[in-house]
Image (cartoon, rainbow, N blue to C red):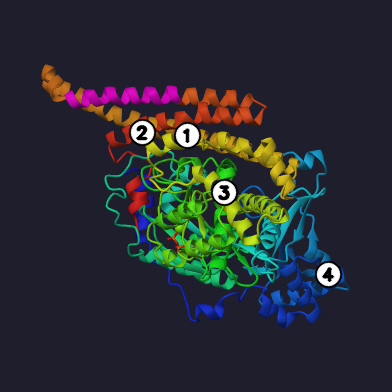
């Protein structure tokens, strides 16, 4: 074993699980570091509290004068909890969270100092943020970027800093972050859904989207992970031969959580409790050293913030436990990658989950309305939904025979399929109103019982109905959920608006009563949304062929997938719904394309370095040992050596061939990179990286991995898969 590898493994074997103190019940600690209603009641005046509540509930603006009251209360609360600094916490388009801390501390002359935090510091800041991605927005308009308080996501204390969730926008109001378009999309779906709910219940005033994410990740001992330059620099392994044992025995999934991992999880959970992140589920995932963490679902904006925060918490706490946490979608070839299922639903301020079949026929008609409209929305905008989850890292997962394919389809299960079929056939031609009602009662009345049986879950579907919510499974583990949530809520909002127009037209013409009109439009939708429904094996080749026949998109790579974001109809859609204007849509497209190129560029450089600086020199060393051996045999045995050194001679040749292949492929890759970099057109550049640079990764890897199993284990410098994956 090479020295580096030896020390890494030795280090990893020394680790013992960290003791994690837990004295209080979790329910007691929950939200302790959040400026939630309880804290607000204690620290705010009645007026200030009412003003925040109205902002959260109705989206009303908070008066500047009131903001001063709020900031003072917030500061007092934060200081009482040991905070010394505050920050506007936001989610720029880098994918990470951003914060710049300022102390409450201020001098007031005469050698005196106070703690101060004013309303304007709470409400708005102008961080020097010129290095965040902006896709040209800040060049075209103004260089400045502003953060503005989002009162719908409560402030929290992280470490010793009061964090205030904010949006990040340009001087001219263009979104420079993930949160702004999400908030707009949530607003759009709220309006559109409330209008539909009014058909059923006049009391509904607000509809909120809910999100429950499931975060998958790998835990690798820190010493082992840092011994691999590819993991350090790219978050994944770029080479490495599969170990003799992988996940084929399925002995990791839901298995006993290893003690070290358990200690780490408990530590995360404790921190999450303080931060008000309602984590609930933890378990081993399919691959060795792979795990999952899931919370109780929350309002979508808050859930997105909580997931972003959690990813940060996970990284921080990993250090304490000497772990490296890998969020990458595909850290290891040959074993499962990681995703982040986004469970999504809509619910009313009257407490109804609109995607939960109800007990009465009327509430079921409401359920069917939202259920069918969601399917229809996905059918119409499947390509846009695919684009929402596109990234260089997720490309390794989608369609790779283990994760949902790059084709978007909807799974609804056998029983609901039957329900839709029956609904479709209810009226051939016209029925009398009486008949219609009866039939409707009949058909619709079937649903409650069918829902109880929710066993036929199809794990290969990218978008599945699971009893009382849809589960968008194709989202990548590194993704900021805001992106898919923005698109999903926007397309559903658009669909609901269109639905209302059609229903109202039927009612206005006095041809139909409300329920019949709803029913009729839904029935048409069932007919026109069939192409997106698929119950079979999404991983199969047959489905790929079938999907093509149905006209569904199958954009396997990010550069292909992203294009639809700037199509005329997509730009118009986001513009019409007030989610993003043309400039914002184009900027995002540019940022994501550029990110793809940069990502691939870095990986390509790292792979080139490892192949040339680690693999080839090691191969040469081993080859020299073999040569020495052969020469020795020749000295001792004379002509007989040829028979005795047959294997060695073959190895020597084989090694030379691999070395030659690696060198020429790396040279080819470097040249391809250079030619891509010359391109000023971001689209061409990304395409070049995708079709000319990236395919060489596999070829280079092939030869390196062959050498790995050929070369003396003592010499091999890179920590092997079996060490990375099976050290507990
Ligand atoms: P799985 O079988 O997919 O792992 P889990 O039960 O672990 O399912 O996860 C389901 C997730 O869905 C949880 O995070 C849960 O909070 C979330 N969820 C449940 N109901 C809803 C809902 N109405 N809206 C959004 N998310 C929901
Ligand atoms: Mg799930």
- Asked if marks 2 and 1 touch (Cβ < 8 Å), the reply is no
Q: Which is more N-terminal, label 2 or label 4?
A: 4
Q: Is residue 523 magenta?
A: no
Q: Quadrant of residue 528?
A: top right
Relative placement, left or right, of 418 versus 190 is: left
**How many neighbours does mark 3 have within 10 angstroms: few (below 14), some (14-19), or many (20 or more)?**
some
Q: Report the image quarter containing ligand 2.
A: bottom left
Label at residue 107: 4
Mark 3 residue element: helix
Q: Nearer the viewer, mark 4 or mark 3?
A: 3
Q: Nearer the viewer, mark 3 or mark 1?
A: 3
- Asked if marks 4 and 3 touch (Cβ < 8 Å), the reply is no
Q: Which residues are magenta?
A: 646-665
Q: Is residue 241 above or below residue 170?
A: above
Mark 4–mark 1 distance (CA, rounded to whole Å): 68 Å
Q: Which residue is mark 1?
A: 548
Q: Which is more N-terminal, label 1 or label 2?
A: 1
Q: Which residue is mark 3?
A: 525
Mark 2–mark 1 distance (CA, rounded to whole Å): 47 Å
Quadrant position of the N terminus in the picture:
top left
Mark 4–mark 3 distance (CA, rounded to whole Å): 66 Å
Mark 1 residue element: helix
Label at residue 618: 2
How many numbered circles are shown?
4
Relative placement, left or right, of 456 versus 144 is: left
Q: Is residue 614 above or below residue 513?
A: above
**How many neighbours does mark 2 have within 10 angstroms: few (below 14), some (14-19), or many (20 or more)?**
many
Q: Is residue 659 magenta?
A: yes
């Amino acid at each position: 074993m090479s020295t580096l590898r030896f020390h890494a493994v030795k280090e990893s074997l020394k680790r013992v699980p960290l003791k994690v103190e837990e004295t209080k019940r979790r329910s007691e600690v929950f939200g302790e570091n959040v400026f939630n209603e309880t804290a607000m009641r204690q620290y705010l005046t009645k007026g200030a509290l009412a003003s925040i509540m109205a902002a959260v509930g109705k989206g009303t603006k908070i008066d500047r004068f009131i903001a001063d009251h709020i900031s003072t209360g917030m500061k007092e609360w934060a200081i009482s909890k040991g905070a010394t600094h505050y920050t506007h916490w936001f989610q720029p388009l880098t994918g990470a969270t951003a914060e710049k801390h300022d102390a409450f501390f201020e001098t007031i002359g005469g050698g005196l100092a106070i703690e101060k935090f004013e309303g304007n510091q709470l409400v708005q800041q102008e961080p020097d943020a010129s290095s965040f991605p902006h896709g040209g927005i800040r060049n075209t308009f103004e260089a400045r970027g502003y953060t503005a308080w989002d009162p719908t996501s409560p402030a929290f204390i992280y470490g010793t800093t009061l964090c205030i969730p904010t949006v990040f926008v340009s001087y001219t109001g263009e979104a420079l972050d993930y949160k702004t378009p999400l908030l707009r999309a949530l607003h759009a779906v709220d309006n559109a859904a409330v209008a539909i709910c009014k058909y059923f219940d006049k009391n509904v005033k607000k509809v909120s989207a809910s999100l429950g994410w499931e975060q998958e990740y790998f835990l690798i001992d820190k010493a082992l992970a840092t011994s691999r330059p590819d993991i350090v620099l790219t978050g994944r392994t770029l080479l490495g031969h599969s170990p003799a044992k992988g996940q084929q025995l399925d002995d990791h999934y839901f298995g006993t959580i290893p003690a070290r991992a358990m200690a780490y999880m408990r530590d995360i959970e404790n921190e999450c409790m303080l931060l008000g992140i309602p984590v609930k589920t933890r378990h081993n995932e399919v691959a060795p050293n792979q795990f999952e963490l899931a919370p109780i679902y929350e309002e979508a904006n808050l859930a997105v913030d909580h997931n972003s925060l959690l990813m940060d918490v996970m990284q921080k706490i990993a250090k304490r436990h000497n772990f490296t946490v890998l969020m990458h979608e595909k850290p290891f070839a040959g074993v499962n990658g990681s995703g982040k299922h986004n469970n999504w639903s809509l619910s009313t301020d009257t407490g109804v989950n609109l995607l939960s079949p109800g007990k009465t026929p009327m509430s079921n008609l409401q359920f069917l309305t939202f259920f069918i409209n969601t399917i229809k929305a996905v059918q119409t905008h499947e390509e846009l939904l695919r684009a929402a989850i596109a990234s260089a890292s997720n490309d390794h997962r989608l369609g790779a025979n283990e994760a949902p394919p790059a084709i978007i389809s909807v799974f609804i299960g056998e029983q609901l399929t039957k329900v839709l079929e029956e609904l479709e056939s209810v009226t051939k031609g016209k029925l009398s109103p009486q008949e219609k009602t009866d039939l409707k009662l009949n058909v619709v009345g079937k649903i409650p019982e069918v829902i109880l049986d929710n066993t036929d879950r199809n794990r290969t579907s990218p978008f599945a109905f699971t009893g009382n919510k849809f589960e968008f499974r194709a989202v990548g583990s590194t993704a900021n959920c805001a992106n898919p949530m923005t698109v999903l809520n926007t397309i559903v909002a658009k669909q609901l608006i269109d639905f209302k127009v059609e229903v109202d037209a039927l009612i206005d013409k006095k041809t139909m009563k409300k329920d019949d009109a709803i029913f009729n439009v839904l029935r048409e939708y069932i007919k026109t949304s069939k192409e997106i429904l698929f119950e079979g094996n999404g991983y199969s080749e047959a489905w790929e062929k079938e999907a093509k026949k149905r006209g569904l998109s199958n954009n396997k790579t990010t550069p292909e997938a992203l294009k639809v974001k700037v199509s005329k109809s997509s730009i118009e859609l986001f513009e019409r719904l007030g989610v993003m204007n043309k400039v914002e849509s184009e900027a995002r497209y540019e940022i994501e394309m550029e990110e793809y190129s940069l990502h691939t560029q870095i990986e390509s450089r790292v792979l080139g370095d490892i192949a040339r600086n680690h693999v080839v020199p090691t191969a040469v060393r081993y080859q020299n040992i073999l040569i020495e051996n052969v020469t020795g045999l020749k000295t001792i045995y004379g002509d007989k050596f040829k028979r005795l050194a047959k294997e060695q001679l073959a190895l020597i040749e084989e090694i030379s061939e691999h070395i030659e292949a690696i060198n020429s492929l790396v040279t080819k890759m470097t040249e391809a990179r250079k030619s891509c970099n010359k391109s000023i057109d971001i689209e061409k550049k990304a395409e070049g990286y995708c079709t000319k640079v990236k395919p060489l990764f596999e070829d280079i890897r092939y030869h390196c991995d062959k050498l790995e199993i050929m070369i003396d284990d003592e010499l091999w410098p890179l920590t092997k898969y079996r060490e990375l994956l099976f050290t507990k």
